Amino acid sequence: MIIKNKTIVADDWMVLRLQEHETAESIAVAAGKVIVPLKVWQAQRETLQQRKNIGVWLASDERPEDLKGDIGKFAVIAVDFPKFSDGRGYSIAYNLRARLGYTGELRAIGDVLRDQLFYLQRVGFDAFEPRTDRSIEDALKGLSDFSEVYQTSIDQKSPLFRRVQRKGNPAGAA
Protein backbone atom coordinates (compact mmCIF):
# COMPACT_ATOMS: atom_id res chain seq x y z
CA MET A 1 0.00 0.00 0.00
CA ILE A 2 1.08 3.56 -0.72
CA ILE A 3 -0.36 7.04 -0.32
CA LYS A 4 -1.14 8.60 -3.71
CA ASN A 5 -2.98 11.86 -4.20
CA LYS A 6 -3.89 11.92 -0.48
CA THR A 7 -5.51 8.45 -0.60
CA ILE A 8 -4.27 5.02 0.47
CA VAL A 9 -4.14 2.79 -2.61
CA ALA A 10 -2.75 -0.59 -3.63
CA ASP A 11 0.71 -0.33 -5.14
CA ASP A 12 1.10 -2.12 -8.46
CA TRP A 13 4.72 -1.05 -8.98
CA MET A 14 7.76 -3.04 -7.83
CA VAL A 15 10.89 -1.15 -6.76
CA LEU A 16 14.03 -2.90 -7.99
CA ARG A 17 17.03 -2.66 -5.67
CA LEU A 18 20.40 -4.08 -6.60
CA GLN A 19 21.96 -6.61 -4.26
CA GLU A 20 25.71 -6.58 -3.54
CA HIS A 21 26.57 -9.16 -6.21
CA GLU A 22 24.39 -7.60 -8.94
CA THR A 23 25.41 -4.97 -11.47
CA ALA A 24 23.33 -2.43 -13.37
CA GLU A 25 24.39 -3.96 -16.67
CA SER A 26 23.58 -7.60 -15.83
CA ILE A 27 20.45 -7.42 -13.65
CA ALA A 28 17.35 -8.86 -15.30
CA VAL A 29 14.40 -6.47 -15.02
CA ALA A 30 11.20 -8.46 -14.44
CA ALA A 31 8.09 -7.99 -16.56
CA GLY A 32 5.36 -5.73 -15.23
CA LYS A 33 5.53 -2.31 -13.63
CA VAL A 34 9.06 -1.86 -12.32
CA ILE A 35 10.83 1.20 -10.89
CA VAL A 36 14.52 0.70 -11.66
CA PRO A 37 17.54 2.50 -10.20
CA LEU A 38 18.93 5.32 -12.34
CA LYS A 39 22.11 3.27 -12.91
CA VAL A 40 20.06 0.38 -14.37
CA TRP A 41 18.15 2.78 -16.63
CA GLN A 42 21.43 4.26 -17.87
CA ALA A 43 23.03 0.83 -18.43
CA GLN A 44 19.98 -0.78 -20.10
CA ARG A 45 18.32 2.25 -21.65
CA GLU A 46 18.08 0.84 -25.19
CA THR A 47 16.10 -2.18 -23.97
CA LEU A 48 14.07 -0.54 -21.21
CA GLN A 49 12.88 2.45 -23.23
CA GLN A 50 10.78 0.06 -25.33
CA ARG A 51 8.63 -0.67 -22.26
CA LYS A 52 5.76 1.57 -21.18
CA ASN A 53 5.75 0.19 -17.63
CA ILE A 54 9.18 1.37 -16.48
CA GLY A 55 9.78 3.95 -13.79
CA VAL A 56 13.10 5.13 -12.42
CA TRP A 57 14.31 5.99 -8.93
CA LEU A 58 17.08 8.32 -7.91
CA ALA A 59 19.38 7.87 -4.94
CA SER A 60 19.91 10.95 -2.79
CA ASP A 61 23.38 11.50 -4.28
CA GLU A 62 22.21 11.39 -7.91
CA ARG A 63 21.15 14.34 -10.04
CA PRO A 64 17.74 14.68 -11.68
CA GLU A 65 19.40 16.39 -14.67
CA ASP A 66 20.69 12.94 -15.66
CA LEU A 67 17.10 12.21 -16.79
CA LYS A 68 16.69 15.44 -18.77
CA GLY A 69 16.24 13.88 -22.21
CA ASP A 70 14.20 10.94 -20.94
CA ILE A 71 11.94 12.50 -18.33
CA GLY A 72 8.79 12.17 -20.43
CA LYS A 73 9.24 8.40 -20.76
CA PHE A 74 8.40 7.68 -17.11
CA ALA A 75 4.94 7.37 -15.57
CA VAL A 76 6.63 7.38 -12.16
CA ILE A 77 9.89 8.74 -10.81
CA ALA A 78 10.81 7.86 -7.25
CA VAL A 79 13.34 9.47 -4.96
CA ASP A 80 14.98 7.32 -2.31
CA PHE A 81 15.47 8.60 1.23
CA PRO A 82 18.19 6.35 2.68
CA LYS A 83 17.57 7.78 6.14
CA PHE A 84 15.05 10.16 7.67
CA SER A 85 17.59 12.94 8.17
CA ASP A 86 18.85 12.99 4.55
CA GLY A 87 17.11 15.97 2.96
CA ARG A 88 18.70 15.89 -0.49
CA GLY A 89 15.58 14.23 -1.91
CA TYR A 90 13.61 17.43 -1.32
CA SER A 91 15.89 19.30 -3.72
CA ILE A 92 15.73 16.48 -6.26
CA ALA A 93 11.91 16.59 -6.22
CA TYR A 94 11.80 20.38 -6.49
CA ASN A 95 14.19 20.33 -9.44
CA LEU A 96 12.22 17.58 -11.20
CA ARG A 97 9.04 19.65 -10.97
CA ALA A 98 10.26 23.25 -11.26
CA ARG A 99 13.28 23.04 -13.52
CA LEU A 100 12.71 19.89 -15.56
CA GLY A 101 8.91 20.15 -15.81
CA TYR A 102 8.11 16.59 -14.73
CA THR A 103 4.33 16.16 -14.41
CA GLY A 104 3.98 12.41 -13.73
CA GLU A 105 3.83 10.61 -10.40
CA LEU A 106 6.65 11.63 -8.07
CA ARG A 107 7.07 9.11 -5.27
CA ALA A 108 9.08 9.23 -2.01
CA ILE A 109 10.54 5.82 -1.07
CA GLY A 110 12.90 4.57 1.62
CA ASP A 111 12.98 5.90 5.17
CA VAL A 112 9.82 8.00 4.74
CA LEU A 113 8.00 8.98 7.94
CA ARG A 114 4.80 10.86 8.76
CA ASP A 115 6.73 13.93 9.92
CA GLN A 116 8.09 14.43 6.39
CA LEU A 117 4.93 14.03 4.32
CA PHE A 118 3.58 17.59 4.57
CA TYR A 119 6.92 19.02 3.49
CA LEU A 120 7.47 16.38 0.81
CA GLN A 121 4.18 17.30 -0.86
CA ARG A 122 5.20 20.98 -0.79
CA VAL A 123 8.18 20.25 -3.06
CA GLY A 124 6.16 18.17 -5.52
CA PHE A 125 5.77 14.63 -4.25
CA ASP A 126 2.28 13.23 -4.84
CA ALA A 127 2.92 9.61 -3.82
CA PHE A 128 4.55 8.21 -0.70
CA GLU A 129 5.71 4.78 0.35
CA PRO A 130 6.02 5.12 4.14
CA ARG A 131 8.16 2.73 6.13
CA THR A 132 6.45 -0.63 6.58
CA ASP A 133 6.95 -0.62 10.35
CA ARG A 134 4.68 2.46 10.68
CA SER A 135 0.95 2.93 10.26
CA ILE A 136 0.05 4.11 6.77
CA GLU A 137 -3.23 5.54 8.12
CA ASP A 138 -1.27 7.66 10.60
CA ALA A 139 1.16 8.71 7.86
CA LEU A 140 -1.76 9.90 5.72
CA LYS A 141 -2.70 12.36 8.48
CA GLY A 142 0.75 13.93 8.10
CA LEU A 143 -0.31 15.48 4.79
CA SER A 144 -2.69 17.81 6.62
CA ASP A 145 -0.62 18.63 9.73
CA PHE A 146 -0.71 22.35 8.87
CA SER A 147 -3.53 24.44 7.45
CA GLU A 148 -1.44 27.29 6.07
CA VAL A 149 2.06 27.83 4.68
CA TYR A 150 4.17 31.00 4.72
CA GLN A 151 6.69 30.31 1.98
CA THR A 152 6.35 29.68 -1.72
CA SER A 153 7.01 26.25 -3.20
CA ILE A 154 5.68 23.94 -5.89
CA ASP A 155 2.28 23.73 -4.18
CA GLN A 156 1.90 27.46 -3.38
CA LYS A 157 3.37 30.06 -5.72
CA SER A 158 2.53 33.09 -3.58
CA PRO A 159 3.83 33.81 -0.05
CA LEU A 160 1.32 34.31 2.77
CA PHE A 161 1.87 38.07 3.01
CA ARG A 162 0.67 38.38 -0.60
CA ARG A 163 -2.42 36.20 0.02
CA VAL A 164 -3.73 37.93 3.17
CA GLN A 165 -5.64 41.19 3.19
CA ARG A 166 -4.50 43.20 6.19
CA LYS A 167 -6.94 45.33 8.20
CA GLY A 168 -6.04 48.74 9.52
CA ASN A 169 -4.48 51.83 8.09
CA PRO A 170 -3.40 51.69 4.47
CA ALA A 171 0.32 51.91 3.85
CA GLY A 172 1.58 55.48 4.25
CA ALA A 173 -1.39 56.70 6.34
CA ALA A 174 -0.66 58.60 9.53
Image (cartoon, helix red, strand yellow):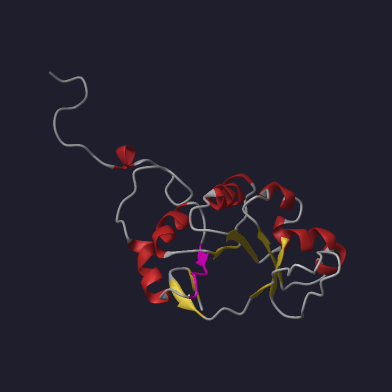
Q: Is residue 32 above or below residue 45?
A: below
Going by the image, does 33 lie left or right of 113? right
Quarter-wise, where is residue 118 in the image?
Answer: bottom left
- Does the segment drawn in magenta span residue 128? yes
Q: Main secondary structure of the magenta part?
A: loop
Spot occupied by residue 106 in the image (x, y as percentages of width and height): 57, 61
> Which residue is found at the position 33% from the left and 38% from the top?
162
> Which residues are drawn in magenta?
126-132
Going by the image, does 152 lie left or right of 162? right
> Which residue is found at the position 13% from the left and 32% from the top?
168
Q: Is residue 119 above or below residue 45?
A: above
Q: Is residue 119 above or below residue 129?
A: above
Quarter-wise, where is residue 16 in the image?
Answer: bottom right
Spot occupied by residue 14 in the image (x, y as percentages of width and height): 65, 76
Q: Is residue 140 above or below residue 89?
A: below
Going by the image, does 168 lie left or right of 6? left
- Does the segment drawn in magenta span residue 49? no
The quadrant of the picture occupied by the C terminus is top left
Spot occupied by residue 94 in the image (x, y as percentages of width and height): 55, 48
